[in-house]
């Protein structure tokens, strides 16, 4: 029962102590995961998607402007007359300036030979090859005159986006319309956040970049970044979270990379996780130790309460045979000797009051001896001159605390088995003082206890339960064990010289309180 209760208590304490700690560790892990999802994954995704949307929108807008404006310019038929017709020239400029809007892009209208007819600048950028080279965007425009073509050109701040469309008059290419969108504007679209962005073609060439110089070499994206998508990449001592998404540009597909530095954040996560793990590793042994200690103390308290309950039950078992015999004697003494009957009633009353008094489990020896004398006085009236009772009490032992009414069953046993062949009772009660204990002896001069009966009593005293009719000596033995430990108890002996001797030792302890 004790082990079962202790194990149940340990499980309960573990449930209410360790489990909350593990729940806190789990909550900390969840918070770190949520922080990662928001601070890294979420911001990276939002920045990448916004940049991809803006870049694709710019490509689509200039594709639409190129197609519509090329058709508008083709209505002029003879493009050389624009130099002379101010009205047509003004309408064309108005249309072209409307197309570029706030982008800061340059526009050019050139003839078949590549001469600038209209433009925000007088000459084409040097990065654009001459029309006669039949290379680059000119070759594509020649093959697909009704398609807006786009390509990137080297520029001082990166690469400009060049959008071109052939101007077709009567089924023949009469010139070309070009928009030169600056790299600075495109880079500003790449990201409004602090997340570095890089736009690459299918060869890994970096066409646009914002804060991404360290992730490329010779205008090419580094290999470990080019193959990464939604994963961590280590570069030197730094760690980056890399994602990518496709972006359509002028009929081709480019790829936009978002690179988030996460070194500092991961260090903080590692420190936080380490602190959580360390706290768990430190707290669990402390909690388990406290659980074991508390369960042990609680089990001991339960044992103590059980002991108190058992002691009170044992103390309440005043021998009913003694009470009935005394009352029978009083009944006859009332007729034969009323004065003696009165004395017996007073002695019995004092003894009963003493047995039920709530003044603690232990009393001074001299007080208990006083009431023990009341018990023997009743017996003296019962047996008369046949009872010879002597007491030898060491003066030094009179103030020693002893269990209340502990000796009465011993004298009762001596009265029961102590008659000699002539029916006389000679009982000696002796208490001697030693350094750490009191030696108590009750001796009678009777015929002793039969061997079989003696063996039965000795076996009973070795047991922790009593299913027999022998209550008195067993109760004394059990009270001694509960108060002073299993090593303490009675010893019954019938020496060869005759009679019966009962020995017990009481440790010298301080007086206990009523429920201690």
Image (cartoon, rainbow, N blue to C red):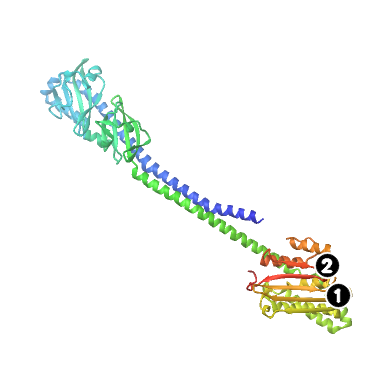
Residue 117 visible: yes
Label ID, residue 449: 2
10 Å crowding of disc 2: few (<14), some (14-19), many (20+): some
Query: What's the residue at 38%, 43% (across, down)?
Result: 38
Circle nearer the viewer, 1 or 2: 2
Note whether 53 is above or below 508 in the view shown: above
Where disc 2 sits, the SS reads loop
**What's the distance in space between the residues labelled 1 and 2, CA to CA?**
27 Å
Give the residue at the far left of this rendering.
Answer: 84
Residue 233 location in percent, x, y? 35, 36
* Disc with the residue nearer the chain's start (1 vs 2): 1
Give the residue at the far bottom of this rendering.
Answer: 339
Label ID, residue 229: none
The quadrant holding residue 491 is bottom right
Residue 318 visible: no
Residue 140 location in percent, x, y? 24, 19
Residue 102 location in percent, x, y? 21, 35
Give the residue at the far top of this rendering.
Answer: 171
Look at the image and tell me in which quarter the N terminus lies: bottom right
Where disc 1 sits, the SS reads helix
Q: Nearer the viewer, residue 487 or 278?
A: 487
Residue 451 appears left or right of 76: right
Residue 378 appears left or right of 111: right
The quadrant holding residue 293 is bottom right
Look at the image and tell me in which quarter the C terminus lies: bottom right
Query: What's the residue at 26%, 38% (across, down)?
Result: 211
Query: What's the residue at 17%, 23% (across, down)?
Result: 129
Residue 382 appears left or right of 310: right
Name the residue tied to disc 1. Answer: 328
Q: Nearer the viewer, residue 43 or 319?
A: 319
């Amino acid at each position: 029962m004790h082990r079962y209760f202790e194990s149940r208590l340990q499980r309960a304490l573990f449930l209410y102590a360790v489990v909350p700690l593990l729940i806190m560790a789990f909550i900390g892990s969840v918070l770190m995961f949520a922080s990662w999802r928001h601070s890294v994954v979420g911001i990276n995704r939002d920045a990448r998607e916004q940049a991809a949307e803006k870049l694709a929108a710019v490509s689509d807008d200039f594709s639409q402007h190129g197609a519509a404006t090329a058709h508008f310019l083709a209505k002029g038929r003879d493009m050389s007359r624009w130099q002379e017709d101010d009205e047509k020239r003004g309408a064309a400029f108005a249309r072209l300036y409307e197309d570029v809007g706030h982008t800061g892009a340059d526009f050019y209208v050139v003839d078949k030979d590549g001469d600038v007819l209209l433009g925000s600048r007088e000459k084409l950028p040097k990065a654009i090859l001459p029309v006669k080279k039949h290379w680059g965007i000119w070759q594509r425009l020649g093959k697909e005159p009704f398609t807006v073509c786009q390509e990137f050109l080297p520029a001082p701040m990166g690469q400009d986006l060049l959008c071109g469309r052939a101007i077709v008059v009567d089924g023949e290419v009469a010139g070309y319309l070009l928009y030169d969108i600056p790299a600075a504007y495109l880079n500003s679209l790449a990201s409004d956040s602090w997340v570095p962005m890089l736009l690459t073609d299918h060869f890994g060439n970096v066409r646009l970049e914002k804060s991404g110089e360290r992730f490329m070499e010779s205008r090419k994206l580094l290999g470990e970044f080019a193959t990464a998508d939604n994963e961590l990449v280590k570069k030197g001592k730094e760690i980056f979270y890399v994602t990518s998404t496709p972006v359509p540009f002028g009929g081709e597909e480019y790829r936009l990379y978002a690179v988030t530095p996460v070194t500092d954040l991961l260090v903080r996560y590692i420190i936080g996780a380490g602190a959580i793990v360390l706290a768990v590793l430190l707290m669990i042994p402390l909690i388990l130790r406290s659980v074991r200690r508390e369960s042990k103390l609680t089990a001991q308290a339960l044992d103590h309460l059980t002991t108190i309950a058992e002691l009170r039950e044992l103390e309440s078992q005043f021998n009913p045979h003694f009470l009935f015999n005394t009352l029978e004697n009083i009944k006859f003494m009332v007729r034969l000797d009323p004065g003696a009957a009165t004395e017996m009633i007073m002695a019995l009353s004092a003894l009963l009051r003493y047995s039920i008094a709530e003044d603690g489990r232990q009393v001074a020896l001299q007080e208990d001896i006083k009431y023990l004398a009341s018990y023997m006085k009743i017996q003296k009236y019962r047996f008369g001159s046949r009872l010879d009772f002597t007491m030898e009490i060491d003066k030094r032992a009179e103030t020693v605390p002893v269990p209340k009414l502990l000796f009465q069953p011993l004298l009762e046993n001596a009265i029961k088995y102590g008659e000699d062949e002539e029916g006389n009772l000679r009982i000696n009660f002796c208490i001697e003082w030693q350094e750490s204990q009191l030696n108590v002896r009750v001796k009678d001069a009777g015929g002793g206890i039969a061997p079989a009966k003696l063996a039965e009593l000795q076996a009973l005293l070795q047991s922790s339960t009593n299913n027999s009719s022998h209550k008195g000596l067993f109760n004394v033995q059990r009270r001694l064990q509960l108060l002073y430990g299993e090593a303490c108890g009675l010893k019954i002996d019938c020496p060869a010289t005759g009679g019966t001797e009962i020995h017990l030792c009481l440790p010298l302890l301080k007086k206990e309180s009523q429920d201690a």
